[in-house]
Image (cartoon, rainbow, N blue to C red):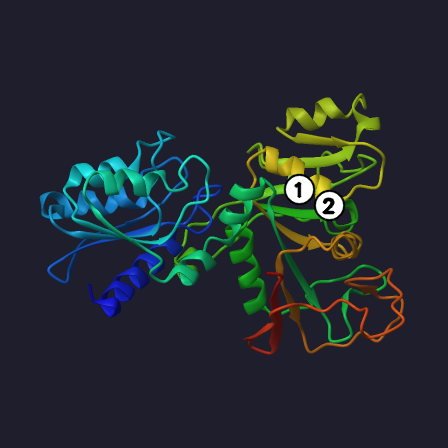
Amino acid sequence: MNKNLDEKYMARAIELAKKGIGAVNPNPLVGAVVVKDNRIIGEGWHKKFGGPHAEVWALNKAGENAKGATIYVTLEPCSHQGKTPPCAKRIVESGIKRCVIANFDSNPLVSGKGIEILKNAGIEVEVGVLEKEAKDINKVFFKYIENKVPYLFLKCGITLDGKIATRSGKSKWITNEITREKVQFLRTKFMAIMVGINTVLKDNPSLDSRLDEKKFGIEKRNPFRVVIDPNLESPIGAKFLNFNDGKAIIVTSTDNKNFEKIKEYKDLGTRFIFLEGKIFKIGDILKELGKLEIDSVLLEGGSGLISTAFKENIIDAGEIFIAPKIIGDNSAISFINGFNFDSMEDVFKLSNPKFNIYGDNVSLEFENL
């Protein structure tokens, strides 16, 4: 077949898949395009967790014309009955002649079985078209499905001298409005947002998403709100607790299990993760969040949590937004602290840096591959 055409239609499938950002976790982003006689006759994407998969939307639009056509899918069609019927079987029933796939699905429930169903039905299968591009949009899914540990993405906004707040804790606003819009996108993209108790006590943040849906082309979704609170100091009236959506999670010490305020928190729909001691490893927190089927976490701070994450070398990727502002105060709050390196060879070095411009702000995006 024509390689250029295969890549053209797979690129379209990848663009469609991105429309599911923030809506399908912990499922993968998937797009599908049905082509016949070099014309798209059906396309779709996975729109919502628990809803029909991309292949079903595309095949429904193609209808009877799907017979003898080619379907392009960004991820191996599922072969098992989950919240929806198996897509591989649906493709076979549609009369599709050829199936082009970007990535194998590393989910043990699928992992080659979908392709096997297609081949056994006499469908021509090709795997690996725009493989890297399709895999890039599902980094969260692949990490979570293979390890059951959420993908950890760091976000912070800093001054040119590396501060996230003045010595009195004032931080509004370091970055500009364009940057703050990008943050709302990240809060929708990732399934949970995590901060420390000091952030709650100082700023009383809502930790919700205020995404401009029109501008970003995806639906807004509020993340799970995870607060690391060893001594259970979160006020009952804290904004992050009062959404009545069951998405507030407090990580606290097992010493607090019988604390009388626990019932008040639970009456608000708050969930708890109890860990031993008062100093927690972020790696342990992520494992517990993984058990709740949370596949990704946006780490927003404060500096204590960020420093711990660097110490544990547990950050998968991140974006540090930098404003052209200088506080110039040694007592102002740095975004990271507590380290004492003797040489430049030993310091933290962010991998695969990419630079973005947001008006008069810039950002350094990085990824630990």
Q: Quadrant of residue 214?
A: bottom left
Q: Amino acid at mark 1?
A: Leu
- Element type at mark 1: helix
Name the quadrant of the N terminus. Answer: bottom left
- Distance Cα–Cα, label 2 vs label 1: 6 Å
Q: Position of residue 209 (x, y in %)?
A: 54, 50
Residue drawn at point x = 61 percent, y = 75 percent: 362
Q: Which mark is residue 25?
A: none
* Mark 2 lies on residue: 282
Whether the residues at callouts 2 and 1 have beta carbons within 8 Å, the answer is yes
| Vertical comparison of 285 with 85: above or below | below
Camera sees residue 242: no
Between 257 and 338, the one lying in front of the other is: 338
| Vertical comparison of 21 with 159: above or below | above
Name the quadrant of the C terminus. Answer: bottom right
* Mark 1 lies on residue: 286
